[in-house]
Image (cartoon, grey):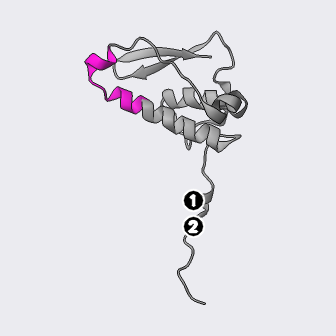
Amino acid sequence: MQGNPITTSIFDLFKIGPGPSSSHTIGPMKAAFDFRERVAALPAHQLDRADALHIHLYGSLSATGKGHGTDRAIVAGLLGWQPDTTDPDALLALLTDPAVTYPVAVAHRTFAVGA
């Protein structure tokens, strides 16, 4: 039996990035990064109306987010980090101290994000 060969790469099956659950870290990190890029592209008069960033999680992300690192992944994405280049130790260090906030620069504005 002849047919088309399977052309699935190992990289199609496995993604490089932080865990323990890629659906709770890689996806949210990419989404937060994308949000940051989209907000940065807003006209200055719209961005100037913002006074804070508020993060709300729903579904399984809200139920297991901290246990699976979703909270850290979102902050990392807002900081401009990407899953394939993020230092796992740096990611694990995020949000370890509730008193620490992280400056998220968006265009000409900076917002403090923390635990």
Number of other residues with Cα within 10 Å of mark 1, as a class: few under 14, some 14 to 19, many 20 or more: few
- Tell me where residue 14 sits by quadrant: bottom right
In this rendering, the answer to whether 78 lies above or below 26 is above
Location of mark 1 (residue): 12
Residue ranking furthest to the right: 67
Quick check: 1 left or right of 112? right
Residue 103 in the image: state x and y as whole percent: 49, 17
The quadrant the C terminus occupies is top right
* Amino acid at dot 2: Thr
Look at 66% across and 13% down and name the residue there: 98
Structural distance between the alpha carbons of marks 2 and 1:
6 Å
Q: Secondary structure at mark 2?
A: loop
Instruction: Name the main secondary structure of what is drawn in magenta.
Output: helix
Which one is in front, 24 or 97? 24
**Residue 22 is inside the magenta segment:** no
Q: Position of residue 80 (x, y in %)?
A: 48, 31
Instruction: Look at the numbered discs 2 and 1 and tell me whether their residues touch, using CB distance below 8 Å.
Output: yes
**Which region shows up in magenta?**
36-48
What number is the disc on residue 8?
2
Q: Label 1 sits on what residue type? A: Asp
- Tell me the residue at 54%/71% (across/down): 7
